[in-house]
Amino acid sequence: MNSTRIPAQRAIVDRRELAGTIDTLVAEYGDKARPKVVATLKAALEAGRSELARRLAAKPSAGHECAGGHAFLIDQLVRVIHDYAVTHVYPAANRSKAERLAIMAVGGYGRAEMAPQSDVDIAFITGGKGTAWCEQVVEAMLYMMWDLGLKVGHSTRTVDQALRMAKDDLTIRTAQLEGRYVWGDRELYDEGVRRFEREVVRGNERAFVTEKLAERNARHKRMGDSRYVVEPNVKDGKGGLRDLHTLYWIGKFIHRVRAAAELVDVGLFTPAEYRSFRRAENFLLAVRCHLHVLTGRTEDRLTFDMQRRIAERMNFAERPGKSAVERFMQLYFLHAKRVGSLTGVFLAHIDEQFAARSAKSGFFAGWKQRGRNLKGYKVFGGKIAAPSDDWFRKDPVRLVEIFQLAEAEELELHPEAMRQADRDSSLIDNAVRKDPRANALFLDLLTGRNDPELVLRWMNEAGVLGKFVPDFGKVNAQMQFDMYHHYTVDEHTIRAIGLLNKIEKGELAEDHPRATRLIHKVNSRRVAYVAALLHDIAKGRGGDHSVLGAEVARDLCPRFGMTESETELVAWLVLNHLLMSRTAQKRDLTDPKTIEDFVGEVQSAERLRHLAILTAVDIRAVGPGTWNSWKGQLLGELYDVSSERLRLGHMREGREHRIAGKQQQVSELLGKQAHLVEELAATLGDAYWIAEPVDIIAQNLVQYAAAREQAHELSVHCEFYEARGATLVTVIAADHPGLFYRIAGGIHLAGGNIIDARIHTTRQGWALDNFLVQDPHGGAFAERSQLDRLKKSIGDALANRVDLAPRLAQRPLAHSRARVFDVSPRVLFDNKASNRFTVIEVNARDRPALLNRLARTLFEQRLVVHSAHITNYGERAADTFYVTDLTGHKLSAGERMDAIEKALIEAASDALQDKLENA
């Protein structure tokens, strides 16, 4: 693809010397020389690879040099193998016209771009069909290459066959497009190239572009359809090497360019764009070479463990607020982003060129589409363009205006306008940033009613967004090194804005009914959009990003033209954007103190409305599957109870009224079995009636009455609980110490993850425990076989039919890659979060049956667990327990609390996991 000069070539491999050695071996050993020849070639291959690996370690960013070096090494070996085969193995003095053989490198090898473990893609071109000599030579060469351990992709065809297949198959057409002469009959190769251009390329340009782009879109979809996925595929992912190759293939097919540099000559790239093309390609090739060296195989996925090791190999250092791996990945995503913007400009130019060609021929020859004028801009074919090359230089505020108009008028940006915006983005200085008109335009774009997400993404790709809002520029392409966040910070933020727009348009009413209602009740929709833009703006600076982000908001909002009250509300939302999700997922929402504390922070209905909306889009924009009906239900409960408390200044009903109201509702649900409410009301106690939802109480009463009537020592009921997107597991058993951890162990053994647990004891000494359970992918167990497996597993655990600890340790971790991350166990005690209980929160690396181990430790420390709330953030688990001591009292600070903390940290530690796994 590009002519990269390989320095000191003979230090990699000296072909003449190697060929001389082989001639000597043949002279000495005759027909028995082959094993010696293979050994000699293998030594040359290993020496060459070692030399290239050494060079990569010395110059870890030299991607072109490394990839070109490996192609050079294979070239020389293929030439020597060919010469050995035709000279010593199958010599033919008078070859016929059919007995001609050319060796052509195709694919990545054809581009002279090979990572250390890349396949060797070769096409053998023969002069005629089925010639014995050609078949023998090809076979001899292939066996020799396989003996060297090379992975060879090969085909043997005549020129006619190759052209016929290229016409029918896009993959073969692309491979041949990159064909490069390696050795053999040069005239035969040249004939193939001439005919390929004449018979396959000419007249098929538009079809090739269409097919290639469809192939690219399908590949993107397969790889996650974002260039900001946190474990990207360097070769096939969006913004990866394959996207650069696609540009080259299209340019080569349409304009017959022979090297990427020639894309400048045909007007598809400016010199500056070509330089950034080369920089991105060089970096991505270097990363791919490091991946191959480290894994010893064809590995193109930049997994978390590889990210850390490659960052080290490429000499990235830590900076305040940013680890070395985060800095490395930020540069990776900046290059991927650049590939994206180059692709956009390039393809739009191709479109223009096709359109120009069409206009010069046929019915519309000589007809020119007349554009319209929009505030001085040219608009034609649904695209907005600057009227002159100096348009932005004359007034840099136009760099914001053009994007605002594109959003408001539902227009695309003309490729030349994107190119100019990219080039001129550096004109945005403090004067432009403070310009009231520029800020008003930006706010109009941000809160646009059509598609602000798409246009903000263009603005970001062109570098204008980061220049106009420098704080946003700092989080551009910034990843967070964890398994929870799927996207870079800028991509997450722009997605959140897009989700907000969809919610406002009613497009997500099914998943977010509450937010869909609330967005139309807030006093300022501008607050909602600006808060979404700024909520993560201070990530990567060190310190609490919520606190630092609130300071940024206080500076930026007045600049955007927001009022003092809007500014204060945005700052409060940024400061507290995690408050609602943390409270809903980590606290007991039936505990009045939880609501009192939350309402004490929120203080107004307007704040609550905005916080509910921001929380929904923030969670959903984290990545696929992070929002589910369980989280929606929890957040909805918290919103409804808090809204009532704020509106009335108190809970609508006192404790007794609430219990009586619930009992009435349960009676109505039970119908003919309504008598159970009266019979069991006293035995279950007030805490039970307040904690459980009406539908669960109804089910619990029927199960409890049946268990007591039949004198069952153990009753386990499992059912799909659609309202919560989970499986409800109810266990009724004689209460005894350790019951909770054994039930948890049984659920874990059946493959379940507990997301919520409420533990009750009747006045007759029976435990009535309700668990909400999901499968490892966040879905519910709904099949009868799954529910039966859950029941059996819990029964086995409670009857001591299984030894829990070793069995649980052997269960595979849902995220085995969690080992890559540093997650030190942390234990927090909170005696203020509840009037009745001490709240213990344990943060630790997620692992098999963590909850079981923690619950067992609490039992061993003589604590009673009343409820448990389980949250996962990728590799990190946050498990919260509401506990008392055996006398029903809270814990006091001191030696006892210290001992509990020490025991919990040990239970959550990697050391214990390793010990159990090796037991």
Image (spheres, rainbow, N blue to C red):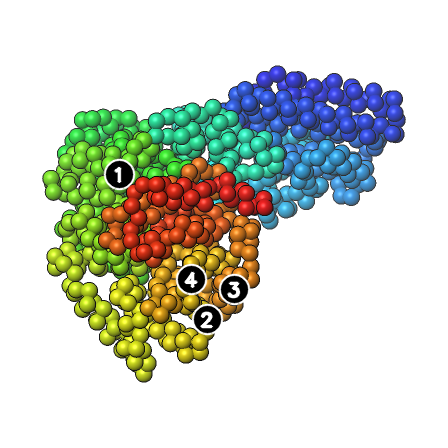
Name the spot of residue 531 as percent of width and height, x first.
23, 43
Q: Nearer the viewer, residue 705 or 816?
A: 705
> Is label 2 in a helix, a strand or a loop?
loop
- Pointer 4 and pointer 1: residues touching (CB < 8 Å)? no
> Is label 3 in a helix, a strand or a loop?
loop
| Residue denoted by label 3 | 799
| Residue denoted by label 1 | 546
- Pointer 4 and pointer 2: residues touching (CB < 8 Å)? no
Residue lying farthest to the top in this orientation: 8
Res. 206 visible in picture: no
Left-right relation of 652 to 664: left
Mark 3 crowdedness (10 Å alpha carbons): few <14, some 14-19, many ≥20: few
Q: At label 3, which amino acid type do we have? A: Ala
Left-right relation of 886 to 275: left
Mark 2 crowdedness (10 Å alpha carbons): few <14, some 14-19, many ≥20: few
| Residue denoted by label 2 | 713
Sooner in the amino-acid sequence: mark 4 or mark 1: 1
Q: At label 2, which amino acid type do we have? A: Glu
Question: Which image quarter: residue 28?
Answer: top right
Q: Nearer the viewer, residue 723 or 268?
A: 723
Q: At label 1, which amino acid type do we have? A: Ser
Relative to 6, is 258 above or below? below
Q: CA distance from mark 4 to mark 3?
A: 13 Å
Q: CA distance from mark 2 to mark 3?
A: 11 Å
